[in-house]
Image (cartoon, rainbow, N blue to C red):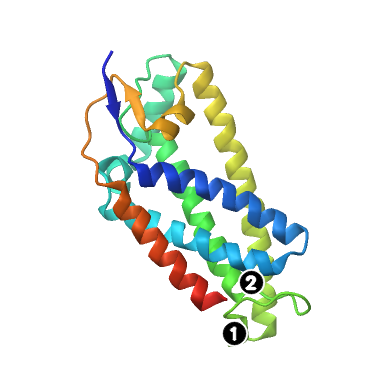
Amino acid sequence: MQRVKIWDSFVRLSHWLMVVLLVAMWWTADNDYMEWHLRLAPLLGGLLISRLVWGLVGSQSARFSYFLGGPKAVLQHLREFKNGHYQPSNSHNAAGGWAVMLILLLLLAQFVSGLFAADGYFYEGPLAARIGSDAAELMTDIHQIVFDVLVVAVVLHLIAIVVYKLRGVSLVAAMLHGYRHNVGAVPLRNGLIGIALAAVAAFALFVWIN
C-alpha cells in the first residue's frame, strides 16, 4: 500500500494553530480578557495571511488553483461519495476545498472587522479611531455576526470529518502526519518557508497592533 506525503509541515502546523487560536480568542473575548485577545490576534492574522499566500505559491496540494473546482466537480464528488465510489485524492476534495476556502475567508473577515471594531466602552481595535464611532460599532456587530457564521461553518466541517471517517476516509490523520495512502505524488515545497513567512507576518502585526 503506497503511502504518499500530501501536506507539508506549514499546512499542518497552520491548520492546528488556527484551531487553537480560534478557541483561545473566543475564550478571551467571552471572558473580557481583551488585552490577551489583542495579543493573540496578530498570531492568527499572521497565520491566515501566510496561508493565503501559500495557497498561491506554496505546495501544489495547498494551492487554491489545484483543489478548487467548479459546481460540476463538487456535484460529481458528492454523487461519488453518496454511492460509495469516492477515492481520496492528494489534496482537499472538491467539496472540502470550498469549505476550507469559506473558513479562511470568514477568518479574514473576522480579523479585518476586529481591527476596526469598538464597543464604545471596553474595546477599541487599532484602526477604529479612523472610521468614527458609529462605523466602529457597526464593525463590532459584523465581527460578532461573522463569528456566529464561522461557528456554523466549523460545526459543519466537524460533521463532515465524522461522516468521511465512517466511510473509511480519515481526514484528521492526514492533517496530523501529512500522509495518505494510494494517491498520486504531489510536489511539495519546504514547509519551513511558510512557517518563516507566518512568523514574520505575525511579528509585524504584533508590533503594529500592540
Q: Amino acid at mark 1?
A: Ile
* Position of the N terminus by quadrant: top left
- The span from disc 2 to disc 1 (Cα, nearest Å) is 10 Å
- Find disc 1 in the rendering and name its residue: 131
Work out whether residue 134 or residue 183 is closer to the camera in this orientation and state it: 183
- In the structure shown, which secondary structural element does the residue marked by tag 2 occupy? helix
Q: Position of residue 78 (x, y in %)?
A: 43, 26
Q: Residue at x 25, y 54 (%)?
A: 57
Q: Position of residue 165 (x, y in %)?
A: 51, 21
Graded by Cα atoms within 10 Å as few (under 14), some (14 to 19) or many (20 or more), the crowding at tag 1 reads few
Q: Amino acid at mark 2?
A: Met
Q: Residue at x 39, y 20 (%)?
A: 80
- Find disc 2 in the rendering and name its residue: 139
Q: Taking the image as drawn, is residue 69 in sight?
A: no
Asked if labels 1 and 2 touch by Cβ distance under 8 angstroms, the answer is yes
Relative to 70, say whether 112 is above or below. below
Q: Residue at x 37, y 35 (%)?
A: 94
Q: Position of residue 145 (x, y in %)?
A: 66, 59
* Position of the C terminus by quadrant: bottom right
Work out whether residue 200 or residue 85 is closer to the camera in this orientation and state it: 200
